Image (spheres, rainbow, N blue to C red):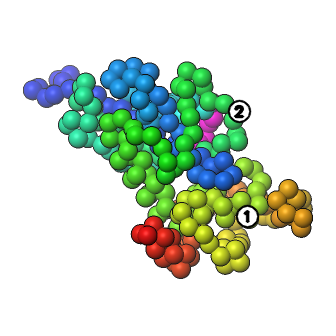
């Protein structure tokens, strides 16, 4: 038997919700769709799963073609399978979230015409891509409170104020500087370097780097990276 009888053939696609940090705020990477339907409208980066690929292989290929980077942090978000989600053919999409250090590359592949938008201020997207982005943002906020995965968005060396700015951008609220620093340093994941960033203040702020060995061990451990009090503050800010 080569095929199951009387079964409808479906297309399978992947869509990548790509987040990056520019030093000030979280950004979402979008492209203008280059073909019909919805040609010229804003879209997530994606593509169809080829016959010899798994969904993860396809997402990895899409990210590699777009950024030129290997080893990007990526995880499966959700499978979107509404029968009418694509107006051309019945297509199921497996969505993946990816985290990228924007400064790791100079420019995206020109064929994609990709643009970074603020995570909370982006244009309307095609199909169900808005729902994908909203779900990815909620998942990011939940996981970042427990795991150190936001460190994937930072350059090789960074300051605590830069790290705090990253967390404030994700949670759309402000954190107490002293409490934030104590909580972050208590994880033992950061190594202080000898040099300082003196552009932001006269005194300067020490640079830090990630302890790669400890980070790999603790990436999926429950570290409570964001204290409960800060989570409550973030939730209250989001409900205003």
Between residues 18 and 220, which one lies in front from this camera angle?
A: 18
Left or right: residue 198 compared with residue 151: right
Check residue 106 in the rendering and tell me which mark sits there, or answer none. 2
Q: CA distance from mark 1 to mark 2?
A: 24 Å
Disc 1 is placed on an element classified as helix
Q: Could you tell me which residue is drawn at 46 percent across and 54 percent down?
A: 137
Asked whether, in this view, residue 124 is left or right of residue 70, the answer is left
The span shown in magenta is 68-73
Q: Residue at x 65, y 42 (%)?
A: 102
Along the horizontal axis of the image, is 191 left or right of 223?
A: right
| Image quadrant in which the C terminus is located | bottom left
- Can you name the residue that lies furthest to the front here? 240
> Which of the marked residues, 1 or 2, is nearer the chain's N terminus?
2
**Residue 25: % across, % down:** 61, 53
Characterize the local packing of mark 1: few (<14), some (14-19) or many (20 or more) Cα atoms within 10 angstroms: some
Answer whether residue 168 is visible to the viewer in this image.
yes
Horizontal side of 179 relative to 228 (left or right) equals right
- Where residue 3 appears, x then y in whole percent? 18, 24
Q: Secondary structure at mark 2?
A: loop
Q: Is residue 60 visible?
A: no
Q: Position of residue 93 (x, y in %)?
A: 33, 37
Residue 143 image point, x, y percent? 49, 62
- The numbered dot on residue 194 is none
The numbered dot on residue 161 is 1
Magenta stretch holds residue 25? no
Quadrant assignment for the N terminus: top left
| Residue that protrudes farthest toward the left in the picture | 6
């Amino acid at each position: 038997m080569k095929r199951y009888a009387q079964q409808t053939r479906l297309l399978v696609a992947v869509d990548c919700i790509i987040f990056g940090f520019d030093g000030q705020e979280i950004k979402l990477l979008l492209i203008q769709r280059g073909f019909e339907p919805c040609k010229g409208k804003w879209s997530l980066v994606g593509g169809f799963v080829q016959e010899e690929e798994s969904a993860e292989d396809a997402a990895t290929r899409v990210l590699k073609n777009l950024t030129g980077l290997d080893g990007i942090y990526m995880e499966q978000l959700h499978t979107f399978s509404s029968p009418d989600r694509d107006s051309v053919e019945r297509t199921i999409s497996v969505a993946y979230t990816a985290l990228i250090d924007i400064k790791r590359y100079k420019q995206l592949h020109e064929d994609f015409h990709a643009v970074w938008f603020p995570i909370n201020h982006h244009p309307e997207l095609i199909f169900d891509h808005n729902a994908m982005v909203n779900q990815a943002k909620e998942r990011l906020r939940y996981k970042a409170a427990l795991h150190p995965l936001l460190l994937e968005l930072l350059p090789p060396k960074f300051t605590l104020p830069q790290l705090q700015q990253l967390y404030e951008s994700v949670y759309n609220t402000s954190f107490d500087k002293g409490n934030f620093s104590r909580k972050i340093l208590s994880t033992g994941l950061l190594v202080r370097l000898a040099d300082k960033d003196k552009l932001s203040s006269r005194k300067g702020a020490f640079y830090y780097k990630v302890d790669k060995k400890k980070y790999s061990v603790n990436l999926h451990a429950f570290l409570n990276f964001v204290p409960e009090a800060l989570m409550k503050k973030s939730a209250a800010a989001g409900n205003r």
